[in-house]
Image (cartoon, coloured by chain):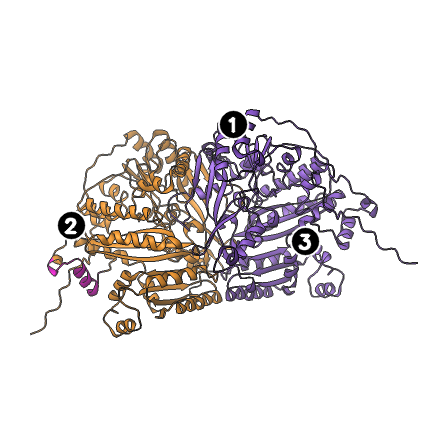
Chain colours: A orange, B purple
Amino acid sequence: MKPQAPFSPDWRKTPPKPGTYRSIFKWGRPDGFKHPNARLYHMVKDVFAMTDADFQRPGNTGDTAVSHGLPLRLDPAHAAWLTDRVGEENVSRDDFSRLKYATGKTMEEALRLRLETVGDLPDLVIHPRHKQDVADIVAYCHEHRIPVYVYGGGSSVNFGFSPTRGGVTLVMGTHMNRLLAISEKNQTATVQPGLMGPEYERLLNGAPEHFNARRRYTGGHFPQSFEHSSVGGWIVTLGSGQQSSYYGDMYDIVLSQEYVTPAGTFRTLDYPATATGPKVSDIMKGSEGAYGILVEATVRIFRHMPENRQRFAFVFTNWESAVEAAGEISQGEFGMPSMFRISDAEETDVALKLYGVEGTVIDRFMTLRGYKPGERCLCMGMANGEKGFAKNIKRRVKRICRRAGAMNISGYPVRKWEASRYHDPYLREDLNDFGIMIDTLESSVTWEGLHRLHREVRDFIKSRPKTVCMTHASHFYPQGTNLYFIFIARMEDIDEYRAFQSGIIDRIVAGGGSLSHHHGVGKMIGPWMERHLGKEQMEVLLALKRHFDPHGIMNPGGTMGLD
Amino acid sequence: MKPQAPFSPDWRKTPPKPGTYRSIFKWGRPDGFKHPNARLYHMVKDVFAMTDADFQRPGNTGDTAVSHGLPLRLDPAHAAWLTDRVGEENVSRDDFSRLKYATGKTMEEALRLRLETVGDLPDLVIHPRHKQDVADIVAYCHEHRIPVYVYGGGSSVNFGFSPTRGGVTLVMGTHMNRLLAISEKNQTATVQPGLMGPEYERLLNGAPEHFNARRRYTGGHFPQSFEHSSVGGWIVTLGSGQQSSYYGDMYDIVLSQEYVTPAGTFRTLDYPATATGPKVSDIMKGSEGAYGILVEATVRIFRHMPENRQRFAFVFTNWESAVEAAGEISQGEFGMPSMFRISDAEETDVALKLYGVEGTVIDRFMTLRGYKPGERCLCMGMANGEKGFAKNIKRRVKRICRRAGAMNISGYPVRKWEASRYHDPYLREDLNDFGIMIDTLESSVTWEGLHRLHREVRDFIKSRPKTVCMTHASHFYPQGTNLYFIFIARMEDIDEYRAFQSGIIDRIVAGGGSLSHHHGVGKMIGPWMERHLGKEQMEVLLALKRHFDPHGIMNPGGTMGLD
């Protein structure tokens, strides 16, 4: 008799049918998947006290074709004018498009669409051809008080573009998606906002072929959403890439910007630095569509020198020593690693489990040497830039980690990480299919505030039974870092989820963290903004809102807590 | 018969008497001097077609005691309330104090005070003791429409704090001049705005002695005005130090700020980075007292490691190759030199003359090798940071310069530069005493725009006969640099000077440069702001002005062109 193969859930391996709810909420490429491996499946059952029986049949999978029949509330005269302006072929008003371009990537939206529940929709979806279209549309909508939302890559995790007041949604990626020019002398690229990450990087890497350039370049910006987010989205939400510690956050990378606002269109100056008063470009960075629409940007680019990359990974005995070493690396003045992250004990245990290290000889060896499960912390990183510069960073990092008692585990884990860096979000669909929620929140914090924030947020999350909380620090600065919290629980009820998420955000604020390091604010975190900034600073943002958008038509309905 | 010693002007070697006009306009320490050496004196006579006879007797030296008797226009009831608030000992209303704290370091003010002409004055000079004093004064002045000006170090070169509407001037350096705290974990210092450069640096360098710190630190900010400017002034005018290419501009260095404004008092958040919408801290940076008064700031500090400093200097055959190499250095991704500058041919010739190189064997050797007078360009720099990092920078810079055909002239010129880095402004008084004007304007520019800006501004300055125009690029970024124009001419008439200066600013704007890289805007450059920014962006600054300061009491009278 053959031994029975262990049960493995029938993870969904086929792309959602076009036009379905699932095709909207599914992360990434329709045919992109990352299924839990046997170890993760085992862990999930273990942690959430589930059995194979719970994985016999998926729950709500959203495989129905979208058909909600919700009426257009926009005055037909307005719809006609707008359609006439951009051409019938650049307007979508079908049920599916209205829902697709209304939907981001929050856990809540995924839960809702699995129930085939439709919330706020735009009345018209418009695909502007160029900045003049955007200017005409904004002027018209301003005059007629029609809400305007902007869809970039659609990867928002905070209801960044949810059309809570109806109106029109402008899709920037359909036509306004070109890399317009590269200046090798200034080392800048001028782009349209709807340009998507992979295409942007492909064109920069291939600058000699595509732009007759002397060198190859990189944008240096690689958020986890890289494959499904746009350059414009990165800018207006103040995104950070996984290699931001060296290349900078989008805040640093953007040099000048052109905006269409109800108060007029302008292009900010492209000097590398000036002392000519408050910089309007700064004011627009992170304005999340509430002040105006980004229609063009000039961004800093960097030399593409992948051959110089230096990789390293270490295991620390505990979180405290990993944090200490990370601070020393960030303040050591030898240049910054491009990617760098330290995982707390729970995340490290999960990682070692998933990589198959748990229970092996290596595991016993580590434990014997004092790197014990439940305490040990993984650290990974890489350095970029000129060869000698990158090598010196690796050398210094090694010395600091060694002195902190960490064990060098070679650059191999980094190569594994690189190979799958954009794939983890694909896990969400499989877990969700069987009622397991997975989501993240992140918060910047100073070195002084780090341990308290980590402890308080973790305590709250772990106070819920059978809940995983993995944390890592990523994005390093001499003054602090970002804590990234990943929480996983068996949870399907939207209200329960919202209450839980809200509790975490409360703890982040109370624990001294920022409301966001790189996810942005959107409408989800908007309600916390005044508490976080204080009334006086909130009033500054409101004064700007009144200036740019006196009729309140730009991304209205709670963005950044402005209305 | 003994040969007659060559004539040397009787350069002023005694401090101005306290209470005189000269004591106000003289740069720096009363007993600080830098006299033109024989070579400079010779050059000056040569270029301006002057003879020893022109240097027999100085012109207007402003040695009279200040006594203008200009009446106080402030309602006595207001004066009484304000005096009562801070104490009689913290109010000055004598003729001298009113003039001293009204006067910055523009050429125009020096010319005016030499004529003993008194312009705009505050009615009361107040020395606030703490931020509550500032808050009370601003609230009172807001209520009663009394203009408020702020005096930091007094080194403004653009009428930054000129009290053009009377009212009160707050002197921050008298009491609010302390380094409040150092956080070694966050690597930050919290300071009061009136803390002066040398004291700030002394306390940071001596952190183990003064703050029981583990390490020594540096502020990394060394503007030419270092000895006579305040940390608060650096922040609110967006200053840059001579080592900004590594340490960053003040814009980068400041982390969080506390402001008193008519619209309320607030402290911005001190996260190293966030994605929580437009940053109010950014809006306040460079607001030049027009939105509110900086009363406290937390700034990034750096490890003090002078032992790691690496110095280098080169001579290039021409300006084009020096600029090309500077661009390559700035974009090479091996870290930035902290100080770096390239001088154009005219500045190089003057420098070599003053250093006594002209006409020597070295000069002939250089010329023979193709580094010819009128063409060759001097470059100097240094690297800071961790030892291996700094050494790698020097190594890479050397390679780039060698490839560009430059001649290595060792680190010696840098040591000379370091020894006298803050002394050059002292030359002004000697030259002015004999009717020779010397002044500077600076402008940031992209690499693409550099040659055009240099040519057009230079052409204009040189179109005036007998006028020296020396230019260097300093403060480097991957996307561009700063051009610093020094112009010298025999000129005493204020109207002539103003017309000339105005012509240069016109050429800077027309030539594609920014209105300022690090001097700020003040009231001098305010009139150009709208042309430079465009109406739409100017309106953003105006909307903020209306929000923070609806009665227009904060640094009114033309600051940044806001009123």
Between discs 3 and 1, the one toward the N terminus: 1
- Residue B360 vs A301, above or below: the answer is below
The C terminus of chain A: image quadrant:
top left
Q: Tell whether A10 sits left or right of B299.
A: left
* Residue marked by disc 3: B347
Q: How far is the residue under mark 3 from the one under mark 2?
A: 75 Å
- Residue A230 vs A557, above or below: the answer is below
**Foreground disc of the pair 3, 1:** 1
- Residue B531 vs A209, above or below: the answer is above
Q: What chain is tagged by disc 2?
A: A
Q: What chain is tagged by disc 3?
A: B
* Residue marked by disc 2: A60
- Amino acid, disc 1: Arg
- Residue B215 vs B273, above or below: the answer is below
Secondary structure, mark 3, is helix
Q: How far is the residue under mark 2 from the one under mark 1?
A: 65 Å
From this viewpoint, which residue is outermost toward the left?
A: A1
Q: How far is the residue under mark 3 from the one under mark 1?
A: 48 Å
Q: State which quadrant residue B100 falls in.
A: top right
* Residue marked by disc 1: B145
Count residues near mark 2 (Cα–Cα under 10 Å), then give few for <14, some for 14-19, many for 20+.
some
